Image (cartoon, rainbow, N blue to C red):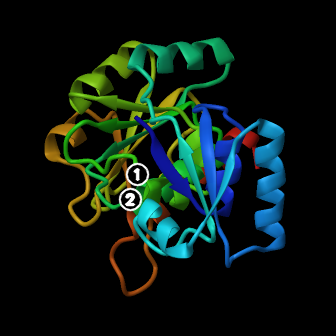
Amino acid sequence: MSEFVYGINPVREGLQGVRRRPLEMFVARDQRSARIEELMAEAQTAGVPVRMRDKGDLDRLAGNPHHQGAVLRIEPFAYVAFEDLVAGWRNSGEKAFFVVLDGITDPHNLGAILRSADAGGCHGVIVPKDRACPVTGVVDKASAGALEHILLCQVTNLSRTLEALKQEGVWIYGLAGESATTLYQAELSGDLALVVGGEGAGMRPNVSRHCDHLLSIPMQGGVSSLNASVAAGVALFEVVRQRLGC
């Protein structure tokens, strides 16, 4: 089996073969550009065959017309086991920094969160098996290639996973708009996991109960909440700010 990623940045990251082996690249005959030529040269260097196709063929492979003229067939995505995720953090010698997603079902939000998590230096992102968006080409494109770098772990029971993280000495912080304690009042420089709830509903009550602390993002305008990926980005980089001592 194989999967398809599309778009200039995701294809470029996929050609590096960091997490998955690239199998072949498809290029639209009528969408040649300097960036496409660069991708073709990178594919040749990596030993990946390049096939010229009509744009309609690429639309079909990508599932939409937003592929920017490049589609890469690649090995299927594989989630990382929870034990391997924890081992990777332990081996890094760094303070733990995980993101836990509860009910993120929009692929664009998932991709954007993965991009922010990778940029923020997270040790991995944890998602539940149910009530969650699967990894798709849309997710890969929205992550701008970060999916090939950030570790993604899928678990059956999110609450039990949070308790397992606590046993490892990791503190659990959940984003909740109703909390009286704001993100900027919390000490976030230690071992932690940041829990982000789904679009609209937020965290499920059972997941919320397993958090050590609930934190809100102070809102100053007329709207009462942020998009899930925006809220995650704000929180992620407050952690980064505190850890860098900025």
Residue type, label 2:
Pro
Q: In which quarter of the image is the N terminus?
A: top left
Q: Decide: is 123 above or below 111.
A: above
Cβ atoms under marks 2 and 1 closer than 8 Å: yes
**Can you give x and y, in whole percent of width and height, for residue 75 in the image?**
51, 35
Marks 2 and 1: which is nearer the front? 1
Q: Which residue is drawn at 24% across and 66% down?
A: 200
Q: Decide: is 31 above or below 38.
A: below
Q: Can residue 120 be seen in this view?
A: no
Question: Between marks 2 and 1, how big is the CA–CA gap?
Answer: 8 Å
52 displayed left or right of 4: right
Q: Which residue is drawn at 42% across and 66% down?
A: 60
For label 2, the residue is 107
Residue type, label 1:
Thr
* Residue toward you, 83 or 227: 83
Q: Residue 143's quadrant in the figure? A: bottom right
Residue at disc 2, secondary structure: helix
Q: Is residue 123 visible?
A: yes
* Residue toward you, 114 or 205: 114
For label 1, the residue is 136
Q: Decide: is 52 above or below 173.
A: below
**Can you give x and y, in whole percent of width and height, for residue 142 in the image?**
52, 61
Residue at disc 1, secondary structure: loop
